Amino acid sequence: MNQTPDFDRLDRALAKWPRVTLTHTPTPLEHLPRLSAHYPAHSLMLKRDDCTGLAMGGNKARQLEFYLGEAQVQGCDTVLSTGAVQSNYMRMLAAAAAKLGFECHIQLETRVKSNDTDYLESGNVLLDKLFGAHIHSFAEGEDEHGADKKLKQIADQLAADGKQPYIVPLAPVEQPKGALGYALAARELAEQFMQQGIEPDMIVVGSGSGLTHAGLLTGFRTLGMSIPVIGMCVRRPVEAQYPRILSTCRKVERMLGLEEVVKEFDIEVSDLALAPGYGQVSQKVVQTIQDVAALEGILLDPVYSAKTVAGTLMMLESGMLEDKNNIVMIHTGGTPALFAYRKQILSLPEFGL
């Protein structure tokens, strides 16, 4: 690699933050030869964070290592969080709580209007129940502050009952500890690039809450590496996501005791694959799920990773990435949600339904 990563700088910055181990890392960095063959001037790779090990894998395990590390230090016995009905975060929190011996309460928000029993009862919801989580409901889908307020009320009642609750936040907070998990993942990727002799031209990652995107970007810049990190919007359009990522990067920098290592021009976001909205799938996204499964034997989830890959392919097909030869996409997991989107996936013409 042309840039020698400053591993010591990042290690020192992360050392003060408590952490538990929930992941099987390093996860593979896998070349996609059959998919790449459709784009002859490009080499497409997938960072397989669907292989983190916990509860069928996913990126949230890296984030939860830092939140639940703090929960243990604080002597908490109960953890809570809020997310969509098919939230990967809630599924992994429930599993991590079971593994570490916490009582778990999750609040499921109605972000996607659906009466489909697959969506409401299968996929992540089924696993939430298997892991023993106490499930609460919140009728609104785009009210982060309202969801947080309701979650705080649940936590207050648990405290009144003698519990020691810890809230894992999803809305923006001053210390987004989950992003530290992806600053650490940037280190892991840098080591893999060195070991495999890869010179990446860009990294593409789903950008929703922003912790994975901002953590990766801040981690690479702390290492002294200038690789472009493109956030593929999965919940908000560019004009709303850009300031969210900038704000999160600034918070992570303060947590790491750094000056501004991320410049405003470093923050790149695209909403090419966002339509028709969060938790909803276009024909292009469904086709991408089928193509990657049939060509590479890899399953993409419909909410995050399929939009990351679909958006990358759309950029390639439009000629936007002519100078980007080596492209690394982050597979953030979420495979259980495939079962919740059964009808949409089977709508492809080749399935004949």
Image (spheres, grey):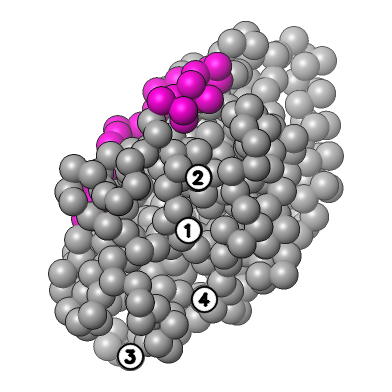
Q: Earlier in the sequence, mark 1 or mark 4?
A: 1
Query: How many residues crowd mark 2 within 10 Å: few (<14), some (14–19), many (20+)?
Result: many
Disc 2 element: helix
Q: Position of residue 263 (x, y in %)?
A: 62, 53
Kind of residue indicated by mark 4: Ala
Residue under label 2 = 221
- C-alpha span from label 4 to label 2: 26 Å
Residue 321: quarter of image: bottom left
Q: CA separation, marks 1 and 2? A: 10 Å
Say which of marks 2 and 3 sits in front. 2
Residues at marks 2 and 3, CA–CA distance in whole angstroms: 44 Å
Q: Is residue 237 visible?
A: yes
Residue 176: quadrant of the picture:
top right
Upstream in sequence: badge 4 or badge 3: 4
**Mark 3 is on which residue type?**
Pro
Q: Secondary structure at mark 3?
A: helix
Residue that badge 1 annotates: 229
The residue to which callout 4 is attached is 273
Extent of the magenta region: 8-30
Q: Position of residue 335 (x, y in %)?
A: 37, 55
